[in-house]
C-alpha cells in the first residue's frame, strides 16, 4: 500500500515572490489544506500566501484581500 504524499502546502513568500519564508502547513488531505489556507488568510493580514497542490498553484493572495487571484488568471 503506497504511503500518502503531503502534496498540499500553504506557504508564506517574500513580497517580491523571490523567496519562500515559511511553510505554514503541509498535508496529504485537500480538506485540511483548505482549512489551513482559510486560517492563514485570517491570521496573517498583508502577507503573501501561496497554496499549492504539489507544484500547481491553487491560490495566491495577500492575506486580507477580498478577491484572491488564482494562477489561471495570471
Image (tube, helix red, strand yellow):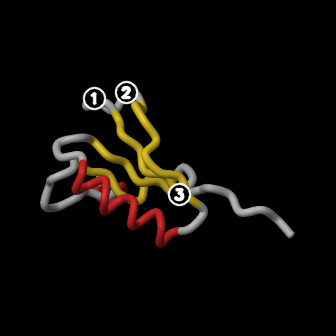
Decide: marks 2, 1 in contact (CB < 8 A)?
yes
| Mark found first going from the N terminus, 3 or 1 | 3
| Left or right: 70, with 45 as reference point | right
Residue at which label 3 appears:
8
Q: Which residue is mark 2?
A: 18
Residue holding disc 1: 16
Residue lying furthest right: 1
- Tell me residue 18's x, y (percent): 37, 27
Does residue 49 appear to the left or right of 22 in the view shown?
Answer: left
Disc 2 from disc 1: Cα separation: 5 Å
Task: Using a 10 Å C-alpha cutoff, classify the residue at mark 2 as few (fewer than 14 neighbours), some (14 to 19) or many (20 or more).
Answer: few
Q: Residue at x 31, y 53 (%)?
A: 40
- Residue depicted at 68% across the width and 58% down the height: 5
User: What residue is rendered at 82% in x and 65% in y?
Assistant: 2
Q: Is residue 27 left or right of residue 19?
A: right
Mark 2 and mark 3: Cα distance apart in space = 20 Å
Numbered disc 1: secondary structure:
loop
Residue 63 locus on image (x, y percent): 21, 50
Disc 3 and disc 1: Cα gap in Å? Answer: 22 Å
Amino acid at each position: 500500500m503506497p504511503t500518502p504524499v503531503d502534496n498540499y502546502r500553504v506557504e508564506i513568500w517574500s513580497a517580491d515572490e523571490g523567496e519562500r519564508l515559511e511553510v505554514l502547513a503541509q498535508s496529504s488531505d485537500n480538506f485540511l489544506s483548505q482549512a489551513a489556507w482559510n486560517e492563514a488568510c485570517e491570521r496573517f493580514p498583508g502577507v503573501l500566501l501561496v497554496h499549492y497542490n504539489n507544484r500547481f498553484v491553487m491560490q495566491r493572495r495577500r492575506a486580507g484581500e477580498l478577491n484572491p487571484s488564482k494562477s489561471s488568471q495570471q
